[in-house]
Image: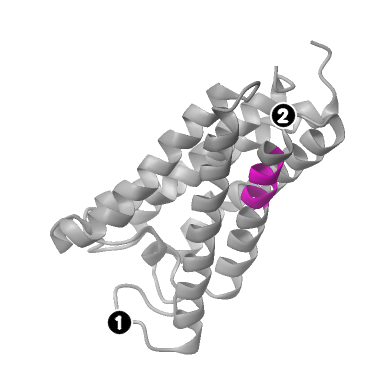
Amino acid sequence: MDRKLINLAGLTGIIALISYTMAVIIAPSAFPGYDWMAQAVSDLSAETAPSRLLWNQLSAAYNVCSPVCVMCISIFVSDKKTGTKLFRLGIYLFTIMNWISAIGYRMFSLSDSGKEIGTFQEKMHIVITIVVVLLSIASLIILIVSGFKKNGMKNIAIWAAVALGMMFVGAIGKNVVSPDYFGIVERFSVFAAVGFNAVLGLYLFNGFE
């Protein structure tokens, strides 16, 4: 196909995934005593975390590329009337979720890593997390339902189902596994949205064909 600039913008989803993955893997090296199996990813970017600077450096591309990718996807599917109205609604909700995540977590990062939630800043971090999770689940369910309808985009629906499954593994796992393994199941949730964003980016790159 003759790819236009907006199609090439789909590659920002892959860049975002690579940037985020590098931050999750490498940033703990600047945090003495950090246990990735037990601690949340957000602990790495807490205001008092020794890994905060390295995290910000490694995730810089993710912070920019993730919202750019989903915004371009929304513009493309809206302009081309890709899929059904229900499909496009799912894309729009997923885009809103990404913007809330990008802005909200920058505004309300954790004050301190690994401690009880108490300050307004920390409570708002939890509120942002709840909103992000609800929008993620809603958008993925809509994409799954629309994908399995007649003339729906079944392949995207399957990817959405995988992402939703990962989110549920994280959500349920937090209440089931030992606190020593909290970090493992939590990573299923955080990588679900980032990974699905990258998948949609590839579809944009190929014009959703």
Residue 90 shown in magenta? yes
In the picture provided, is 189 more to the left or to the right than 54? left
Q: Residue furthest top?
A: 1
Q: Which residue is mark 1?
A: 116
Depth check: give the residue in front, 97 or 66: 97
The image quadrant where one finds the N terminus is top right
Q: Is residue 132 visible?
A: yes
Q: Which residues are magenta?
A: 88-95
Quadrant in the picture for residue 147: top right
- Left or right of 153 on screen, residue 79: right
* Residue at horizontal 73 percent and vertical 37 percent from the top: 73
Describe the element under mark 2 as helix, strand or loop. loop
Q: Position of residue 166 (x, y in %)?
A: 36, 42
Mark pair 1, 2: CA separation: 45 Å
Mark 1, secondary structure of its residue = loop
| Residue drawn at (75%, 42%) of the image | 74
The kind of residue tagged 1 is Glu
Looking at the picture, does residue 121 appear above or below residue 49?
below
Q: Nearer the viewer, mark 1 or mark 2?
A: 2
Provide the major secondary structure of the magenta segment.
Answer: helix
Q: Position of residue 203 (x, y in %)?
A: 65, 25
x and y percentages locating residue 41 in the rendered image: 38, 58
> Count the marks: how many?
2
Does the stretch in magenta take in 120?
A: no
Tell me: residue 72, above or below residue 10: below
Q: Which residue is mark 2?
A: 83
In the rendering, at what x and y percent does residue 209 appear? 70, 16
